[in-house]
Amino acid sequence: MKKLRSSRYVTALIAGAFFMENLDGTVIATALPQMARSFHVGAVHLNIGMTAYLLTLAVFIPISGWVADRFGSRSVFATAIALFTFASLLCGYSQTLTQFTLMRILQGIGGAMMVPVGRLIVLRTTPKDQLTQAIAYITWPGLTALVLGPPLGGFITTYASWHWIFFLNLPLGVVALVLTLLWVENFRVDEHHPFDWLTFLLAGCASTGIVYAMEKLGGEGDRWQMPAVILTLSLLSGVLAVVVARRKPATSLIDFDSLRLSSYALSVYGASAFRIAVSVLPFLLPLMFQIAFGLNAFTSGLYLLALFAGDLSMKIIVIPLLRRFGFRRILIVNGVITAASVALCATLSPATPVPLLLVILFAHGAFRSMEFTCMTTLAYTEIPSERMSRANGFLSAVMQLSMGMGVAVGAITLRLVAHARGHSATLPQLRDFHLAILFMAVLALGPVFNSLSLAPDAGATTSGHRRQELEALEAEAH
C-alpha cells in the first residue's frame, strides 16, 4: 500500500511539472504586444522567444534518456526543475529581446530534461496494470496547457504585467524541487554505453531546421525559397541520422528494436500525424473566432475552455472502457470519432448557437484526450524495463517535434488554402479556416490506419481487456 501511494504521489508531482513546462510554451502568446513595447521592438520579433524555446526542446530531448541512466533520474529531474525555475526568474527580469531569447533557451534545456525524464520516472515506478491511469494523469496537463495558456497569459498581462507569467513559476518550481528530492528514487543503470554523438548532432540539426523552416513558411512573408532550402537540408540530415544510427542499433538514439513492435510504432508514425492535427485547432480556432466571427481575444479564449473540460471528462472512464473494449478497438473507433469531431469544427459559423459550439468543442476535447491516453500508454506496454529509457527518450523527441510543428502546419495550410482560393492569406476568410480544419480531420486518422494491424489483445496486460474471459476459461479447464 505504501508503494502504491508513493507511486501516486510521484505521478501527481510529474503531472504538475508537465503542466508548468507545457503552459510556459503557450502562455506568452497573448503577452507578446506588451513584451514588445517593454523591449522596444515590434511584436512580430517576439516570435523568436517562442521559437527558440521549441527548438531547444527539439534538440535536447533525445539526450535525456542517456543522461538519466548515467546520473540518476532524480538527480536529472531535480536539476531540470531547478534550471527551468531559475531561467523563469531571469526571463521575468530580462531587459532586452536578446536577454529574453537566451533565457528562453536556458528554459528549454531544463524543459527538455524535465518532460521525458519525468515520464521515465512514472514508467519505472508504476505497475503495468496501473499504467493507463498514470499516463492519463500526466497526459492531460500537456493538452490543457495548450488551451489554458493564451487566456491565462491574457489575464495576467491585462491585470498585472507580463513579468508575472514567469514569476509564477518560482513557487511552483521550488515546491516541485523539494518534493522531487523527498519522493523520487534516484534510479540509474549499472551498464554505461558511449553516447551516440553523431546521430545526436544530425538529428538535432534536422529537428531544429524542420521547426525553424516550418515556422518561416507559416509566416506572413513571401520569401519562401530560403525556408524551403533549409527544410530540404533538414530532411536530408534526418535521413543521414537514421543511416548512421543503423550502424550501431544497440546504442543509437533511435530505438529500432522498439520500432519493430507495432504497439510502439503506432505512437511514432500514425500518432505523429494525430498530434500535429489536434495541436493545430488551439491555433486555428481562436483565429477563426476573432477574424471570421468578430469576437474579441478574451471571448475566443474562453470558448476553448470547453476543450479543457472535455479533456478532464475522459479521465474518469478511460480505464473501464479499456478494460471492456481493449486498445485496438478504442483506437480505431475513437480515432474515427475524434476525426469527425475535428470535421464538425469546420461547420462552425457566426450563426452557430453558442451552446452547440461549446458542445462540439467539449466532445472534441474528450475524444482527443482518450486517443492521446491510449496511444501513449500502449507505446510502453511491451517495452522491457532495461530498454525503457531509450524507448522513452526517442518517443519523447518525436512527440515534441510533432506537437511543436502543429502551429506551423496550421499556418502553412491556411496560407495554401487562401492562395488556392485566389486571395491573400493576410486576412483569411471563413471558408479558408473550414478547409484547413477539414485537412486536419483527415490527418487525425493516422492512428486509425496504424491500429488495424494491432492484435486484438494488444496491451491486454495493462488494459485488463479479456482478463476476465481468460480467467473464466482457466477455471473451466481446471
Image: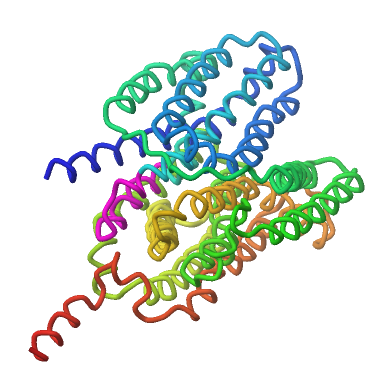
Number of marks in the rendered image: 0
Q: Is residue 31 left or right of residue 180?
A: right
Image location (x, y in percent) of residue 359: 38, 57
User: Who's the residue at 83% across and 54% down the image?
Assistant: 423
Q: Is residue 131 left or right of residue 217?
A: left
141 or 383, which is in the foreground? 383
Q: Is residue 269 left or right of residue 216?
A: left
Q: Is residue 369 above or below residue 30?
A: below
Residue 48 covered by magenta stretch: no
Q: Is residue 323 above or below residue 303?
A: below
State the predominant SS element of the stretch in magenta. helix
User: Who's the residue at 27% across and 26% down the image?
Assistant: 182
Q: Is residue 282 above or below residue 460?
A: above
- The way the protein has been coloured in the rendering is rainbow
Q: Is residue 324 visible?
A: yes
Give residue 129's quadrant in the image. Answer: bottom left
User: Who's the residue at 72% across and 54% down the image?
Assistant: 414
User: Who's the residue at 49% across and 27% down the image?
Assistant: 80
Task: Work out which quarter of the rendered image holds the N terminus and state it.
Answer: top left
Give residue 29's quadrant in the image. Answer: top right
Q: Is residue 218 visible?
A: no
347 or 231, which is in the foreground? 231
52 or 67, which is in the foreground? 67
Task: Work out which quarter of the rendered image holds the C terminus and state it.
Answer: bottom left
Image location (x, y in percent) of residue 26: 55, 34
243 or 147, which is in the foreground? 243
Q: Is residue 347 above or below residue 109?
A: below
Image location (x, y in percent) of residue 62: 60, 44
Segment colored magenta: 122-141
Residue 128 covered by magenta stretch: yes
Q: Is residue 402 left or right of residue 375?
A: right
